[in-house]
C-alpha cells in the first residue's frame, strides 16, 4: 500500500516536471523552466525514497529485474540531464527527455512480480551487464533529446519560423555536439551490454521468439548507432541525418526494453 | 499657392523582394531617371529613394493628383510585365511629409532604428541635387527629415539595442553555430550593406573572407575587419570552406546559382551552411534554400526577426513617432507660410514706397538737414511702418495657423491692391524655423533715407 502510494506520488512528480518543461518549450515561461528543474529534482529524491522502500523486498541484487533496472535508468537519466543543464543552455530539452523518463518509470511499475533470475545467469557478470546497459541507455536518452531538439530546431530554421520555440531551443551546433558526445559515450556501453547479453543467452541455451526479436532489435540499435558514429567520424557527417539515426537507434533500444516488459522476463 | 508634396512607392510592407528587385534603381542611374520623370511636367521637384527595402519617389508639384498619376505610371512601367499598382502606396501633403520623416528616422524600416536608411536617403538627396530636381519644398522637407532623424536618435532610445539587418543575420548565425568565434564567414560584395555586415561580424570574432569584384575595396574592408581578401576565382572553394555567407553584391543576376551550390553542398558533406542574401536584386537563387543543410535567408525572411525587435522597443517607437508629429506640424506651418510670404513682401514694399514718396516730397521743404537728422527721420519712419504693419501681419500669420490664411491673404491683396506683387522667389528656403519665416519681411524695414540726399537721389 505504502509502495503503491509512493510510486503514484513519484509518477505524478515526474509527470509534473514533464508538463512544466513542455510549458516552457511552448510558452517560454521562465517560472515553468525554473519549477520544471525543481520538480525534476524532487522527482529524483522521491524516486530514491521509493527505491529505499523497495530495498527490503529485493533479494540480493538491486536492479535485478528489468523493471528495477528501468526505474534506476530513469532516475540516472534525470540526474545526468540536470547536471548537464547546469553548464549548458539545454534546459528546454527537458521537454523531450522527461516524457521518456516518465515512460521508463511507469514501465518499471508494470508487472513487478517477475520470476527470479535463473541460476546460470546469476554470476559476477550480471551486475556489470546491467550497469553498462543502464549507463548506455542514459547516454542514449540524452542523445535522443538532443537529436529531437536538433530536428525541431533545423525545421524551425528551414521553415523560417523564428518565434519562441526557435529562440528557446539551443543552437544547432550545441545540439549536434551533445548528441555526438552522448552517442560516443553510450556506444561502447551498448556494445558491452550486447556482448554480455549474448554470453548469457548462450548459457541459457534455448532462445524463444521474443528473445530472438529482442536480439534482432538490439543488433539493429547497435548497427544504427555504429552507422551514425561511422558516418560522423569517417565521412564528417553532421546534422539532420545523424540526428534521425540517433533517434531511431534510441527508439530501437526502448523497443527492446518494452519487448522484455511485455514478456515479463529478466534481463538478458 | 505653393506646390504640394507627394510620395508614391512600395516597400517591404507592401511588396515581396522579388518585385522590389525588379523596380530597384541603381544609384548611378537615379539622376537620369529623375530627369525623365520631371520631363512630364507634372512635378517640379523629385527625389528617388531605392534601397533593398523600398523604392519610393518623392515629388512636389502644383497638382498633387497629376503628380501621383505621373509617379504611379513611372513605377508601373518599371515593373512591367508584373502588376505593380496594387503594391503601391501614395501619400499627399501632410501625410507625405510624415512618411518622409518616418523613413529618414528609421521608423518605417524593416529593422526600426537601424542607421543605414538615413545615409541612403541622404545619398538619394545628393543624386537628386545632381539631377537638378530638388527645389524649395523637397529641399526643405529632406533637410528637415535629416534633422528629425538626428533628433529621434538623440532623444529616444530607438537606436539602443537595435540591430541592423546584418547583425540580425549574425544573431541567426549564432542560433546555428552557437559561438561564431573562429567561424569562417564569407562576405560576397563589399557594398554599404556588406560593410555593415563586416562590422557586425568582426565584433563576434569570426574569420572574415571578403570577395568583391573590385579587389581594392575588398582589401580595404578585409584590413578594417582583420580578415582576408580573395579573388573571385576562389569563390567556389571559399563557399566550401565557409560556415556563413553574406551576399550583398549589386549584380543583376544570381551570383550563387543552384548548380554551383549543389556542387558546394556535395563537397561540404552536408555541413550546415548559413546563406544570407541581403542584396536586392537577390544574389542567391531561391531554390538553393531547398538543398540539404543550407539555410537561405533573404531580406524578407530577416524581417521576421525585425518584427520581434520592433515589439520589444514599442515605447521608444512611440516616443520617436511623437517627435515626428511635432516636426510634421512645424513643417506644415512653414509650408503654409510659403503662401503668405509674397503678400508680406508686397505689403512691406507698398508701405515702403508710399513713405519714400512722401518723404521725397516733404524733406526738401525742411531745408538743409544734417546726416544725424536724416538718420533720425529715417528711423522714425521705419518705426511707424513697422508699428502700422505689426498687427495686420500678426493677424495674417495667426490666420494661416487657423486655416483662414487664403481668405486673409486675398483680402489683404485686394485692400492694398497687391495683385501683381507676388514674389515667390523670396520664399524663405534658407530659414530654419517656421515661426521666423516672416520676421525678416517685417522687421528692419529701412527706407534708405540716410542714403539719400534731400532730392531723393542716391549718394
Image: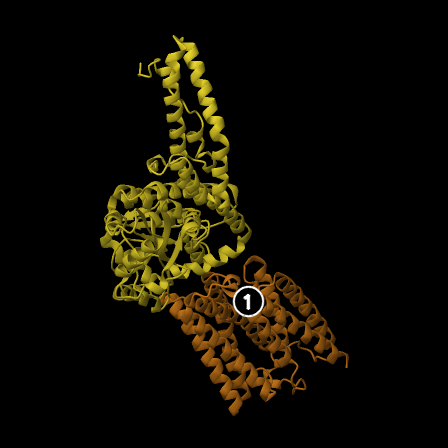
Dividing the picture into quadrants, the one containing residue A62 is bottom right
For the residue pair A173 and B363, the one nearer the viewer reads as B363
Chain shaded yellow: B
Q: Secondary structure at mark 1?
A: helix
Expressed as whole percent of the image width and height from the top left, the position of residue B411 reads 43, 41
How many numbered markers are drawn?
A: 1
Dividing the picture into quadrants, the one containing residue A200 is bottom right
Expressed as whole percent of the image width and height from the top left, the position of residue B344 reads 41, 34
For the residue pair B381 and B430, the one nearer the viewer reads as B381
Dividing the picture into quadrants, the one containing residue B270 is bottom left
Asked if residue A129 is positioned above or below residue B178 in the image, the reply reads below
Asked if residue A108 is positioned above or below residue A91 in the image, the reply reads below
Label 1 sits on residue: A93
Asked if residue B320 is positioned above or below residue B357 in the image, the reply reads below
> Residue visible at 31% across and 14% down?
B459
Expressed as whole percent of the image width and height from the top left, the position of residue B104 reads 41, 47
> Residue visible at 74% across and 78% down?
A5
For the residue pair B69 and B296, the one nearer the viewer reads as B69
Expressed as whole percent of the image width and height from the top left, the position of residue A116 reads 65, 86
Asked if residue A33 is positioned above or below residue B347 in the image, the reply reads below
Subunit ID for the residue under disc 1: A
The coloring applied to the image is by chain
Q: Does B144 sit left or right of A102 as displayed?
A: left
For the residue pair B323 and B293, the one nearer the viewer reads as B323
Quadrant location of the N terminus of chain B in the rendered image: top left
Chain shaded orange: A
Q: Is residue B44 visible?
A: yes
User: Is the residue marked by circle 1 packed among few (<14), some (14-19), or many (20+) residues within 10 Å?
Assistant: many
Q: Is residue B283 visible?
A: no
Amino acid at each position: 500500500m505504502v509502495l503503491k502510494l509512493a510510486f503514484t506520488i513519484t509518477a505524478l512528480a515526474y509527470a509534473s516536471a514533464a508538463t512544466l518543461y513542455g510549458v516552457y518549450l511552448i510558452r517560454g515561461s521562465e517560472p515553468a523552466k525554473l519549477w520544471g528543474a525543481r520538480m525534476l529534482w524532487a522527482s529524483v529524491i522521491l524516486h530514491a525514497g521509493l527505491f529505499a522502500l523497495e530495498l527490503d523486498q529485493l533479494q540480493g541484487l538491486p536492479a535485478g529485474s528489468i523493471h528495477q533496472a528501468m526505474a534506476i535508468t530513469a532516475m540516472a537519466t534525470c540526474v545526468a540531464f540536470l547536471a548537464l543543464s547546469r553548464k549548458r543552455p539545454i534546459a528546454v530539452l527537458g521537454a523531450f527527455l522527461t516524457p521518456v523518463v516518465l515512460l521508463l518509470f511507469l514501465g518499471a511499475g508494470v508487472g513487478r512480480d517477475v520470476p527470479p533470475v535463473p541460476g546460470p545467469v546469476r554470476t559476477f557478470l550480471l551486475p556489470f551487464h546491467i550497469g553498462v546497459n543502464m549507463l548506455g541507455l542514459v547516454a542514449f536518452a540524452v542523445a535522443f533529446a538532443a537529436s529531437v531538439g536538433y530536428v525541431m530546431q533545423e525545421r524551425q530554421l528551414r521553415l523560417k519560423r523564428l518565434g519562441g520555440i526557435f529562440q528557446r531551443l539551443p543552437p544547432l551546433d550545441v545540439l549536434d555536439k551533445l548528441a555526438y558526445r552522448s552517442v560516443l559515450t553510450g556506444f561502447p556501453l551498448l556494445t558491452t551490454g550486447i556482448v554480455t547479453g549474448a554470453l548469457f543467452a548462450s548459457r541459457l541455451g534455448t532462445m524463444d521468439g521474443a528473445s530472438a526479436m529482442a536480439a534482432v532489435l538490439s543488433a539493429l540499435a547497435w548497427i544504427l548507432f555504429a552507422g551514425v558514429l561511422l558516418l560522423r567520424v569517417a565521412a564528417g557527417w553532421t546534422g539532420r541525418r545523424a540526428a534521425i539515426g540517433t533517434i531511431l537507434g534510441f527508439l530501437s533500444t526502448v523497443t527492446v526494453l518494452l519487448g522484455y516488459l511485455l514478456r515479463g522476463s529478466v534481463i538478458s | 499657392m505653393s506646390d504640394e508634396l507627394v510620395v508614391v512607392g512600395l516597400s517591404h510592407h507592401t511588396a515581396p523582394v522579388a518585385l522590389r528587385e525588379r523596380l530597384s534603381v541603381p544609384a548611378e542611374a537615379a539622376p537620369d531617371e529623375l530627369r525623365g520623370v520631371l520631363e512630364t511636367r507634372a512635378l517640379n521637384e523629385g527625389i528617388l529613394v531605392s534601397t533593398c527595402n523600398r523604392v519610393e519617389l518623392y515629388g512636389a508639384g502644383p497638382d498633387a493628383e497629376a503628380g501621383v498619376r505621373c509617379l504611379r505610371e513611372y513605377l508601373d512601367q518599371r515593373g512591367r510585365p508584373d502588376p505593380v499598382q496594387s503594391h503601391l502606396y501614395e501619400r499627399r501633403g501632410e501625410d507625405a511629409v510624415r512618411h518622409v520623416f518616418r523613413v529618414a528616422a528609421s521608423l518605417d524600416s524593416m529593422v526600426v532604428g537601424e542607421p543605414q536608411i538615413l545615409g541612403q536617403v541622404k545619398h538619394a538627396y545628393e543624386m537628386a541635387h545632381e539631377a537638378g530636381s530638388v527645389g524649395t519644398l523637397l529641399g526643405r522637407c529632406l533637410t528637415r527629415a535629416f534633422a528629425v532623424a538626428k533628433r529621434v536618435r538623440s532623444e529616444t532610445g530607438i537606436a539602443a539595442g537595435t540591430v541592423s539587418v546584418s547583425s540580425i543575420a549574425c544573431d541567426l548565425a549564432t542560433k546555428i553555430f552557437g559561438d561564431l568565434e573562429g567561424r569562417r564567414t564569407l562576405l560576397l560584395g563589399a557594398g554599404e550593406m556588406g560593410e555593415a555586415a563586416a562590422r557586425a561580424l568582426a565584433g563576434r570574432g569570426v574569420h572574415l573572407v571578403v570577395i568583391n569584384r573590385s579587389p581594392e575595396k575588398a582589401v580595404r574592408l578585409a584590413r578594417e575587419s582583420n580578415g582576408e581578401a580573395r579573388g573571385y576565382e576562389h569563390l567556389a572553394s571559399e563557399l566550401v570552406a565557409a560556415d556563413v555567407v553574406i551576399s550583398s553584391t549589386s549584380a543583376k543576376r544570381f551570383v550563387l546559382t543552384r548548380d554551383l551550390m549543389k556542387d558546394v553542398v556535395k563537397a561540404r558533406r552536408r555541413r550546415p551552411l548559413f546563406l544570407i542574401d541581403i542584396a536586392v536584386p537577390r544574389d542567391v537563387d531561391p531554390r538553393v534554400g531547398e538543398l540539404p543543410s543550407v539555410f537561405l535567408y533573404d531580406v524578407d525572411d530577416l524581417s521576421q526577426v525585425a518584427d520581434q525587435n520592433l515589439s520589444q522597443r514599442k515605447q521608444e517607437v512611440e516616443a520617436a513617432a511623437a517627435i515626428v508629429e511635432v516636426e510634421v506640424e512645424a513643417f506644415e506651418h512653414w509650408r503654409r507660410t510659403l503662401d503668405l510670404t509674397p503678400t508680406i513682401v508686397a505689403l512691406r514694399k507698398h508701405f515702403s514706397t508710399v513713405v519714400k514718396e512722401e518723404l521725397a516730397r516733404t524733406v526738401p521743404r525742411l531745408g538743409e538737414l544734417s546726416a544725424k537728422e536724416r538718420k533720425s527721420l529715417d528711423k522714425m519712419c521705419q518705426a511707424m511702418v513697422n508699428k502700422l504693419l505689426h498687427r495686420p501681419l500678426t493677424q495674417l500669420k495667426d490666420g494661416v495657423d487657423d486655416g483662414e490664411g487664403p481668405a486673409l491673404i486675398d483680402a489683404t491683396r485686394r485692400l492694398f491692391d497687391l495683385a501683381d506683387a507676388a514674389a515667390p522667389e523670396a520664399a524663405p528656403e534658407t530659414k530654419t524655423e517656421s515661426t521666423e519665416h516672416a520676421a525678416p519681411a517685417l522687421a528692419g524695414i529701412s527706407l534708405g533715407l540716410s542714403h539719400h540726399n534731400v532730392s531723393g537721389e542716391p549718394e
